[in-house]
Amino acid sequence: MKTLLLTISVIFLLAGYAAAPVFAQDAWHRLESDSKDFSIAVPPDYQVLTDKKGYETAKMISRFPLKTRTTKIDDIKRITAYSDGASFLIESYRTTNLGDALEILMFRSKLENSTDFTSNSFRGKSSTKSDGGSYVLDVIFGSKDRIYRIFGVAGSDNHESLKHFFSSIRLDGVAPFVLGSPLEGKIKEQEVLISGLRETPFLFEKAEKTETAPAAALGDKMARVPGVRPQTQDPNRLFIAYKPNPSYTPKAREKGTIGTISFRVTFGAEGRVEKIVALNELENGLTEEAVKVVRLIRFLPQQEDNKPVTVERVLQYSFSIY
Protein backbone atom coordinates (compact mmCIF):
# COMPACT_ATOMS: atom_id res chain seq x y z
CA MET A 1 0.00 0.00 0.00
CA LYS A 2 2.83 2.42 0.89
CA THR A 3 4.50 1.63 -2.43
CA LEU A 4 1.30 2.51 -4.32
CA LEU A 5 0.82 5.81 -2.50
CA LEU A 6 4.45 6.78 -3.08
CA THR A 7 4.32 5.81 -6.76
CA ILE A 8 1.14 7.71 -7.51
CA SER A 9 2.26 10.76 -5.50
CA VAL A 10 5.60 10.93 -7.32
CA ILE A 11 3.89 10.64 -10.70
CA PHE A 12 1.69 13.64 -9.96
CA LEU A 13 4.49 15.70 -8.40
CA LEU A 14 6.52 15.31 -11.57
CA ALA A 15 3.80 17.13 -13.48
CA GLY A 16 5.40 20.49 -12.67
CA TYR A 17 3.53 23.72 -12.42
CA ALA A 18 1.41 23.70 -15.57
CA ALA A 19 -1.56 26.05 -15.57
CA ALA A 20 -4.61 24.36 -14.07
CA PRO A 21 -7.89 24.34 -15.99
CA VAL A 22 -10.79 26.50 -14.91
CA PHE A 23 -13.02 24.35 -12.71
CA ALA A 24 -16.75 24.76 -12.31
CA GLN A 25 -17.57 24.75 -8.60
CA ASP A 26 -20.72 22.65 -9.01
CA ALA A 27 -21.68 20.04 -6.43
CA TRP A 28 -20.43 16.59 -7.34
CA HIS A 29 -22.34 13.42 -6.46
CA ARG A 30 -20.74 10.93 -4.07
CA LEU A 31 -21.75 7.50 -5.36
CA GLU A 32 -21.84 4.90 -2.59
CA SER A 33 -22.26 1.15 -2.33
CA ASP A 34 -25.14 -0.12 -0.19
CA SER A 35 -22.67 -1.33 2.44
CA LYS A 36 -20.88 2.04 2.42
CA ASP A 37 -17.51 0.31 2.03
CA PHE A 38 -16.92 2.01 -1.34
CA SER A 39 -17.65 5.52 -2.56
CA ILE A 40 -16.36 8.01 -5.14
CA ALA A 41 -17.25 11.57 -6.16
CA VAL A 42 -18.29 12.20 -9.76
CA PRO A 43 -19.31 15.35 -11.70
CA PRO A 44 -23.10 15.80 -11.58
CA ASP A 45 -23.73 15.57 -15.35
CA TYR A 46 -23.09 11.81 -15.56
CA GLN A 47 -24.78 9.06 -17.56
CA VAL A 48 -25.64 5.54 -16.45
CA LEU A 49 -25.75 2.22 -18.32
CA THR A 50 -27.17 -0.85 -16.56
CA ASP A 51 -27.08 -4.60 -17.17
CA LYS A 52 -28.89 -6.62 -14.52
CA LYS A 53 -28.51 -10.02 -16.20
CA GLY A 54 -24.77 -9.78 -16.85
CA TYR A 55 -22.95 -12.81 -18.19
CA GLU A 56 -21.05 -15.96 -17.29
CA THR A 57 -17.33 -16.18 -17.90
CA ALA A 58 -14.93 -19.09 -17.48
CA LYS A 59 -11.38 -19.32 -16.16
CA MET A 60 -9.17 -22.16 -17.38
CA ILE A 61 -7.71 -24.09 -14.46
CA SER A 62 -5.93 -26.84 -16.46
CA ARG A 63 -4.97 -27.46 -20.10
CA PHE A 64 -4.65 -31.24 -20.21
CA PRO A 65 -7.31 -32.28 -19.62
CA LEU A 66 -9.10 -29.01 -20.24
CA LYS A 67 -10.93 -27.84 -17.13
CA THR A 68 -12.65 -24.51 -16.54
CA ARG A 69 -14.41 -22.82 -13.65
CA THR A 70 -17.45 -20.63 -14.37
CA THR A 71 -17.99 -17.26 -12.71
CA LYS A 72 -21.18 -15.22 -12.89
CA ILE A 73 -20.92 -11.43 -13.27
CA ASP A 74 -24.13 -9.43 -13.03
CA ASP A 75 -25.83 -6.35 -11.55
CA ILE A 76 -23.54 -4.22 -13.71
CA LYS A 77 -23.59 -0.43 -13.49
CA ARG A 78 -21.43 1.76 -15.74
CA ILE A 79 -21.22 5.51 -15.11
CA THR A 80 -19.59 7.92 -17.57
CA ALA A 81 -18.78 11.56 -16.88
CA TYR A 82 -16.71 14.50 -18.11
CA SER A 83 -15.39 17.63 -16.42
CA ASP A 84 -13.22 20.42 -17.81
CA GLY A 85 -11.08 18.27 -20.09
CA ALA A 86 -11.08 15.05 -18.03
CA SER A 87 -13.15 11.99 -18.94
CA PHE A 88 -14.21 9.34 -16.42
CA LEU A 89 -15.65 5.82 -16.28
CA ILE A 90 -16.88 3.93 -13.20
CA GLU A 91 -17.91 0.28 -13.44
CA SER A 92 -19.54 -1.76 -10.67
CA TYR A 93 -20.03 -5.55 -10.87
CA ARG A 94 -21.43 -8.25 -8.62
CA THR A 95 -19.71 -11.63 -8.86
CA THR A 96 -19.97 -15.16 -7.51
CA ASN A 97 -16.17 -15.59 -7.37
CA LEU A 98 -14.17 -12.46 -6.55
CA GLY A 99 -10.72 -13.92 -7.25
CA ASP A 100 -11.53 -15.37 -10.68
CA ALA A 101 -13.61 -12.36 -11.75
CA LEU A 102 -10.86 -9.91 -10.76
CA GLU A 103 -8.29 -11.89 -12.71
CA ILE A 104 -10.49 -12.10 -15.80
CA LEU A 105 -11.44 -8.39 -15.79
CA MET A 106 -7.84 -7.30 -15.23
CA PHE A 107 -6.74 -9.44 -18.19
CA ARG A 108 -9.48 -8.06 -20.44
CA SER A 109 -8.67 -4.47 -19.42
CA LYS A 110 -5.01 -5.01 -20.38
CA LEU A 111 -3.65 -3.02 -17.47
CA GLU A 112 -0.05 -2.03 -18.31
CA ASN A 113 2.69 -1.05 -15.86
CA SER A 114 0.31 -2.13 -13.11
CA THR A 115 0.92 -2.07 -9.36
CA ASP A 116 -0.76 -4.38 -6.86
CA PHE A 117 -2.41 -2.73 -3.90
CA THR A 118 -4.51 -3.55 -0.86
CA SER A 119 -6.67 -1.32 1.32
CA ASN A 120 -8.30 -3.06 4.28
CA SER A 121 -10.63 -5.66 2.69
CA PHE A 122 -10.00 -4.44 -0.89
CA ARG A 123 -7.34 -5.69 -3.27
CA GLY A 124 -6.59 -4.92 -6.89
CA LYS A 125 -4.27 -3.24 -9.38
CA SER A 126 -3.62 0.30 -10.54
CA SER A 127 -2.10 1.29 -13.86
CA THR A 128 -0.87 4.55 -15.39
CA LYS A 129 -0.05 5.46 -18.98
CA SER A 130 1.34 8.70 -20.36
CA ASP A 131 2.59 9.77 -23.79
CA GLY A 132 3.18 13.46 -23.24
CA GLY A 133 -0.18 14.41 -24.75
CA SER A 134 -2.48 12.44 -22.45
CA TYR A 135 -2.48 10.74 -19.09
CA VAL A 136 -4.54 7.67 -18.13
CA LEU A 137 -5.07 6.23 -14.65
CA ASP A 138 -6.93 2.90 -14.50
CA VAL A 139 -7.76 0.99 -11.29
CA ILE A 140 -9.55 -2.34 -10.77
CA PHE A 141 -10.24 -3.66 -7.26
CA GLY A 142 -12.74 -5.73 -5.34
CA SER A 143 -13.99 -6.86 -1.95
CA LYS A 144 -16.45 -9.57 -0.90
CA ASP A 145 -18.81 -10.02 -3.90
CA ARG A 146 -18.26 -6.71 -5.75
CA ILE A 147 -15.69 -5.41 -8.21
CA TYR A 148 -15.10 -1.80 -9.25
CA ARG A 149 -13.18 -0.29 -12.11
CA ILE A 150 -12.23 3.40 -12.05
CA PHE A 151 -10.85 4.92 -15.27
CA GLY A 152 -9.80 8.52 -15.91
CA VAL A 153 -8.03 10.36 -18.72
CA ALA A 154 -6.92 13.98 -19.10
CA GLY A 155 -4.38 16.00 -21.04
CA SER A 156 -1.86 15.74 -18.20
CA ASP A 157 -1.39 14.16 -14.78
CA ASN A 158 -1.68 17.61 -13.20
CA HIS A 159 -5.32 18.06 -14.18
CA GLU A 160 -7.39 19.24 -11.19
CA SER A 161 -10.57 17.29 -11.98
CA LEU A 162 -8.61 14.08 -12.58
CA LYS A 163 -6.79 14.49 -9.27
CA HIS A 164 -10.01 15.20 -7.40
CA PHE A 165 -11.79 12.22 -8.98
CA PHE A 166 -9.19 9.68 -7.83
CA SER A 167 -8.52 11.43 -4.51
CA SER A 168 -12.23 11.08 -3.71
CA ILE A 169 -12.15 7.25 -3.71
CA ARG A 170 -12.93 5.77 -0.30
CA LEU A 171 -12.40 2.08 0.47
CA ASP A 172 -13.63 1.13 3.95
CA GLY A 173 -13.39 4.82 4.77
CA VAL A 174 -9.76 5.11 3.62
CA ALA A 175 -8.49 7.21 0.69
CA PRO A 176 -5.99 4.91 -1.11
CA PHE A 177 -4.79 7.61 -3.53
CA VAL A 178 -3.12 10.67 -2.03
CA LEU A 179 -2.88 13.01 -5.01
CA GLY A 180 -2.91 16.40 -3.31
CA SER A 181 -6.12 17.60 -4.97
CA PRO A 182 -6.40 21.40 -4.61
CA LEU A 183 -10.19 20.99 -4.83
CA GLU A 184 -10.40 18.91 -1.64
CA GLY A 185 -12.94 20.52 0.68
CA LYS A 186 -14.07 23.02 -1.96
CA ILE A 187 -16.59 20.78 -3.71
CA LYS A 188 -19.98 20.15 -2.15
CA GLU A 189 -21.14 16.56 -2.43
CA GLN A 190 -24.56 14.95 -2.63
CA GLU A 191 -24.73 11.29 -1.58
CA VAL A 192 -26.30 8.84 -4.04
CA LEU A 193 -26.52 5.02 -3.81
CA ILE A 194 -25.08 3.23 -6.84
CA SER A 195 -27.83 0.60 -6.54
CA GLY A 196 -30.46 3.30 -7.03
CA LEU A 197 -29.04 4.60 -10.32
CA ARG A 198 -31.28 4.11 -13.35
CA GLU A 199 -30.39 3.80 -17.03
CA THR A 200 -29.91 7.11 -18.82
CA PRO A 201 -32.25 7.09 -21.87
CA PHE A 202 -30.44 7.05 -25.21
CA LEU A 203 -31.85 6.35 -28.68
CA PHE A 204 -29.56 5.60 -31.59
CA GLU A 205 -30.68 6.38 -35.12
CA LYS A 206 -30.69 4.30 -38.26
CA ALA A 207 -29.55 5.78 -41.55
CA GLU A 208 -32.42 6.33 -43.97
CA LYS A 209 -30.55 4.20 -46.48
CA THR A 210 -27.38 2.15 -46.38
CA GLU A 211 -24.44 4.53 -46.51
CA THR A 212 -20.89 3.88 -47.56
CA ALA A 213 -18.55 5.36 -44.98
CA PRO A 214 -16.00 7.84 -46.40
CA ALA A 215 -12.62 6.21 -46.88
CA ALA A 216 -10.90 9.00 -44.97
CA ALA A 217 -13.07 8.45 -41.93
CA LEU A 218 -12.57 4.69 -41.92
CA GLY A 219 -8.84 5.19 -42.30
CA ASP A 220 -8.63 7.34 -39.18
CA LYS A 221 -6.69 4.96 -36.92
CA MET A 222 -7.08 7.20 -33.94
CA ALA A 223 -10.86 7.00 -34.17
CA ARG A 224 -10.98 3.26 -34.80
CA VAL A 225 -8.30 1.73 -32.66
CA PRO A 226 -8.28 1.74 -28.84
CA GLY A 227 -5.17 2.93 -27.04
CA VAL A 228 -3.17 6.04 -26.41
CA ARG A 229 -2.34 8.56 -29.12
CA PRO A 230 1.23 8.30 -30.50
CA GLN A 231 3.52 11.17 -29.52
CA THR A 232 3.61 12.35 -33.13
CA GLN A 233 -0.18 12.71 -33.21
CA ASP A 234 -1.64 16.22 -33.37
CA PRO A 235 -2.63 16.93 -29.73
CA ASN A 236 -5.58 19.05 -30.92
CA ARG A 237 -7.33 16.14 -32.62
CA LEU A 238 -10.07 14.02 -31.11
CA PHE A 239 -8.36 11.53 -28.78
CA ILE A 240 -10.08 8.25 -28.00
CA ALA A 241 -8.58 6.85 -24.80
CA TYR A 242 -10.89 3.88 -24.24
CA LYS A 243 -12.89 1.98 -26.87
CA PRO A 244 -14.26 -1.32 -25.54
CA ASN A 245 -15.20 -4.24 -27.75
CA PRO A 246 -18.82 -5.50 -27.93
CA SER A 247 -19.80 -8.99 -26.81
CA TYR A 248 -21.65 -11.62 -28.78
CA THR A 249 -25.25 -12.17 -27.77
CA PRO A 250 -26.17 -15.83 -27.09
CA LYS A 251 -28.69 -15.74 -29.94
CA ALA A 252 -26.14 -14.36 -32.42
CA ARG A 253 -23.65 -17.06 -31.45
CA GLU A 254 -26.33 -19.74 -31.77
CA LYS A 255 -27.35 -18.45 -35.23
CA GLY A 256 -23.76 -17.92 -36.38
CA THR A 257 -24.30 -14.25 -37.12
CA ILE A 258 -21.13 -12.52 -38.34
CA GLY A 259 -20.29 -9.23 -40.07
CA THR A 260 -19.25 -5.62 -39.56
CA ILE A 261 -21.31 -2.73 -38.25
CA SER A 262 -20.48 0.90 -39.07
CA PHE A 263 -21.66 3.89 -37.03
CA ARG A 264 -21.46 7.61 -37.62
CA VAL A 265 -20.75 8.96 -34.14
CA THR A 266 -20.96 12.54 -32.90
CA PHE A 267 -18.30 13.28 -30.28
CA GLY A 268 -19.47 16.36 -28.41
CA ALA A 269 -17.45 19.30 -27.16
CA GLU A 270 -18.81 18.50 -23.67
CA GLY A 271 -17.06 15.12 -23.65
CA ARG A 272 -20.14 12.99 -24.39
CA VAL A 273 -21.16 10.76 -27.27
CA GLU A 274 -24.12 12.84 -28.41
CA LYS A 275 -25.44 10.89 -31.36
CA ILE A 276 -25.03 7.42 -32.88
CA VAL A 277 -26.28 6.64 -36.39
CA ALA A 278 -26.12 3.02 -37.56
CA LEU A 279 -24.99 3.01 -41.22
CA ASN A 280 -25.83 -0.70 -41.42
CA GLU A 281 -27.07 -3.35 -38.98
CA LEU A 282 -26.59 -6.94 -37.87
CA GLU A 283 -29.33 -9.17 -36.51
CA ASN A 284 -29.83 -10.99 -33.21
CA GLY A 285 -28.96 -8.09 -30.95
CA LEU A 286 -25.48 -7.34 -32.28
CA THR A 287 -26.33 -3.79 -33.39
CA GLU A 288 -27.70 -2.98 -29.94
CA GLU A 289 -24.68 -4.60 -28.28
CA ALA A 290 -22.33 -2.42 -30.34
CA VAL A 291 -24.32 0.72 -29.48
CA LYS A 292 -23.76 0.00 -25.77
CA VAL A 293 -19.97 0.04 -26.12
CA VAL A 294 -20.01 3.15 -28.31
CA ARG A 295 -21.72 4.94 -25.42
CA LEU A 296 -18.86 3.86 -23.13
CA ILE A 297 -16.10 5.37 -25.29
CA ARG A 298 -13.94 7.74 -23.26
CA PHE A 299 -12.38 10.57 -25.23
CA LEU A 300 -10.95 14.07 -25.05
CA PRO A 301 -12.72 16.45 -27.46
CA GLN A 302 -11.04 17.88 -30.52
CA GLN A 303 -9.63 21.38 -30.03
CA GLU A 304 -9.83 24.35 -32.37
CA ASP A 305 -8.41 27.72 -31.28
CA ASN A 306 -7.87 26.17 -27.84
CA LYS A 307 -11.58 25.41 -27.49
CA PRO A 308 -13.28 21.98 -27.58
CA VAL A 309 -15.47 21.38 -30.62
CA THR A 310 -17.99 18.75 -31.74
CA VAL A 311 -16.88 16.37 -34.52
CA GLU A 312 -18.15 13.27 -36.30
CA ARG A 313 -16.24 10.04 -36.92
CA VAL A 314 -17.14 6.70 -38.48
CA LEU A 315 -16.39 3.66 -36.28
CA GLN A 316 -16.54 -0.01 -37.21
CA TYR A 317 -17.07 -3.13 -35.10
CA SER A 318 -16.55 -6.62 -36.51
CA PHE A 319 -18.15 -9.81 -35.23
CA SER A 320 -16.67 -13.20 -36.13
CA ILE A 321 -16.90 -16.69 -34.61
CA TYR A 322 -13.75 -18.76 -34.29
Image (cartoon, rainbow, N blue to C red):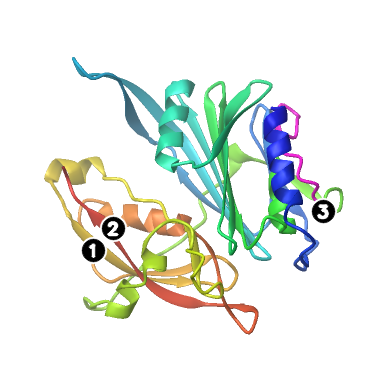
Q: Mark 2 or mark 3, which has the lower sequence index?
A: 3
Spatial CA span between label 1 and label 3: 45 Å
- Which mark's residue is nearer the viewer, 1 or 3? 3
**Quadrant assignment for the N terminus:** top right
Residue 207's x, y, as percent?
A: 29, 75
Task: Residue at the far bottom: name it.
Answer: 305
* Residue position marked by numbered label 2 in the rendering: 287
The total number of labels drawn is 3
User: Can residue 164 be seen in the rendering of this structure?
Assistant: no
Any mark on residue 183, and which?
A: 3
Residue at 18% x, 15% y is 65
Please say if the residues under marks 2 and 1 sit with CB atoms less than 8 Å apart: yes
Residue at 18% x, 42% y is 253
Residue at 68% x, 55% y is 157
Question: Dot 3 lies on which element?
Answer: loop
Question: Dot 2 lies on which element?
Answer: helix
Spatial CA span between label 2 and label 3: 41 Å
Q: Amino acid at mark 3?
A: Leu
Is residue 173 magenta-colored? yes
- Residue 34 vs residue 313, the one in the foreground: 313
Q: Amino acid at mark 1?
A: Glu
* Residue position marked by numbered label 1 in the rendering: 281
Q: Could you tell me what secondary structure mostly forms the magenta stretch? A: loop
Crowding at mark 2 (Cα within 10 Å: few <14, some 14-19, many 20+): some
Q: Mark 1 or mark 3, which has the lower sequence index?
A: 3
Please say if the residues under marks 1 and 3 sit with CB atoms less than 8 Å apart: no
Question: Dot 1 lies on which element?
Answer: loop
- Residue 275 vs residue 3, the one in the foreground: 3
Residue 58's x, y, as percent?
A: 31, 26
292 above or below 72?
A: below
